[in-house]
Image (spheres, rainbow, N blue to C red):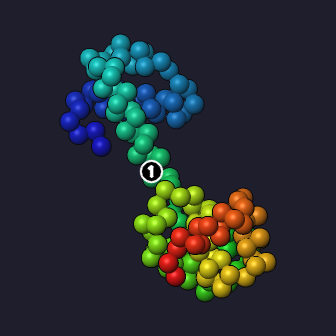
Amino acid sequence: MVAGFPPEVAAVAVLWTAAKAAGVPRPLEDFLRCSKADERRVRRVAWRLKEAVKQSRRPSIEDYVKTLAARVGLPAAVVKAAVELLEKNRRVLAGKNPWVSAAAALWLASFKKLGLLKALAEAAGTTPTSIRNAAGRMRV
């Protein structure tokens, strides 16, 4: 993650990021006074650290499916079928809203029950039209 950067740059970036995360943000200049690190490089490494943390916190699509299924009260068999459907259509749904994709997969896995579409839309915080459009992009 910080390959190619001197250790003092990585150390300053980690300390600066940790101070922000702890709720006591300090100006970067405070940390640079004690180091020979270049400000631009420290900011770049800090950005990489922030992105790595953000990536590690992202829930899987299976988590979205399970959450929606629990909200609507769907059985485990439908959840399993929806997850398999999403795995098959991973490339089609890349970059799309995960709540809408999960709702569309659950709707397709439950054989397109109309009443369920409205309940899924409400549980996902979206519209039935969004779910129908996402379902249309999926191959069953």
Q: How many marks?
A: 1
Q: What residue is shown with label 1?
A: 55
The residue positioned 34% from the left and 30% from the top of the image is: 44
| Location of residue 85 in the rendering, given as x and y in whole percent from the top left corner | 51, 78
Which quarter of the rendered picture does the N terminus lie within? top left
Determine whether 71 is above or below 114 in the image.
above
Q: In terms of secondary structure, where does tag 1 sit? A: helix
Does residue 95 appear to the left or right of 119 in the view shown?
left
| Location of residue 96 in the rendering, given as x and y in whole percent from the top left corner | 53, 58
In which quadrant of the rendered view does residue 80 lie? bottom right
Q: Amino acid at mark 1?
A: Gln
Determine whether 39 is above or below 69 in the image.
above
Query: How many C-alpha atoms fall within 10 Å of the one at disc 1: few (<14), some, or many (≥20)?
Result: few
Does residue 99 appear to the left or right of 43 in the view shown?
right
| Location of residue 37 in the rendering, given as x and y in whole percent from the top left corner | 28, 20
The residue positioned 61% from the left and 82% from the top of the image is: 109
Determine whether 65 is above or below 43 in the image.
below
| Location of residue 106 in the rendering, given as x and y in whole percent from the top left corner | 63, 76
The residue positioned 52% from the left and 82% from the top of the image is: 140
The residue nearer to you, when weighing 106 against 137, is: 137
The residue positioned 45% from the left and 53% from the top of the image is: 56
The residue nearer to you, when weighing 124 against 117, is: 117
Does residue 108 appear to the left or right of 86 in the view shown?
right
Res. 80 in view: no
Res. 35 in view: yes
